[in-house]
Image (cartoon, rainbow, N blue to C red):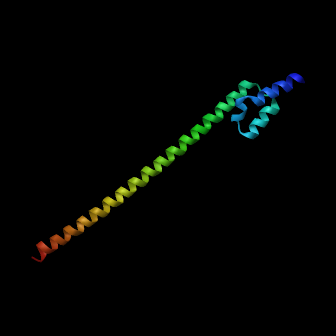
């Protein structure tokens, strides 16, 4: 019993337990999992969180790029529309009604 309590206390103080989310931390402490398993789970949690951050950043960058491309296309189309209208006026004034 003393050995189990000492093992539990050392596991609680280990930094790897602090990286685990609370429900998993409590389960790991209650189950008295080996420290290697807890360390592996903590590393997995950190990796998954980092991957989630990367995915969010990539999605934001893609959305910003798409919005910029759409705005550029709309501006180009509007400018070309104005150019075509001016050219039509020039043709009407010069060719049709000199």
8 over 51 or under it: above or below: above
Residue 19 falls in image quadrant: top right
Which residue occupies 38% across, 53% down? 69
Instruction: Give coordinates of residue 7: x percent, y percent.
Output: 81, 24
Q: Quarter holding the C terminus?
A: bottom left
Which residue occupies 89% across, 23% down? 2
Residue 47 falls in image quadrant: top right
Which residue occupies 13% across, 75% down? 96
7 over 47 or under it: above or below: above
Q: Is residue 46 left or right of residue 7?
A: left
Q: Nearer the viewer, residue 75 or 84?
A: 75
Q: Is residue 9 left or right of residue 42?
A: right
Instruction: Give coordinates of residue 95: x percent, y percent.
Output: 11, 72
Q: Quarter holding the N terminus?
A: top right
Residue 23 falls in image quadrant: top right
Q: Nearer the viewer, residue 66 or 22?
A: 22
Q: Residue furthest front?
A: 13
Which residue occupies 71% across, 24% down? 36
Instruction: Give coordinates of residue 90: x percent, y percent.
Output: 16, 70
53 over 8 or under it: above or below: below
Q: Residue furthest left?
A: 98
Q: Nearer the viewer, residue 88 or 68?
A: 68
């Amino acid at each position: 019993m003393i050995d189990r309590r000492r093992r539990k206390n050392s596991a609680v103080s280990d930094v790897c337990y602090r990286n685990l989310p609370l429900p998993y931390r409590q389960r790991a402490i209650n189950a008295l999992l080996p420290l290697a398993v807890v360390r592996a789970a903590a590393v997995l949690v950190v990796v998954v969180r980092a991957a989630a951050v990367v995915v969010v950043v990539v999605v934001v960058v893609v959305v910003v790029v798409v919005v910029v491309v759409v705005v550029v296309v709309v501006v180009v189309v509007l400018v070309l529309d104005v150019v075509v209208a001016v050219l039509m006026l020039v043709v009407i004034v010069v060719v049709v009604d000199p």
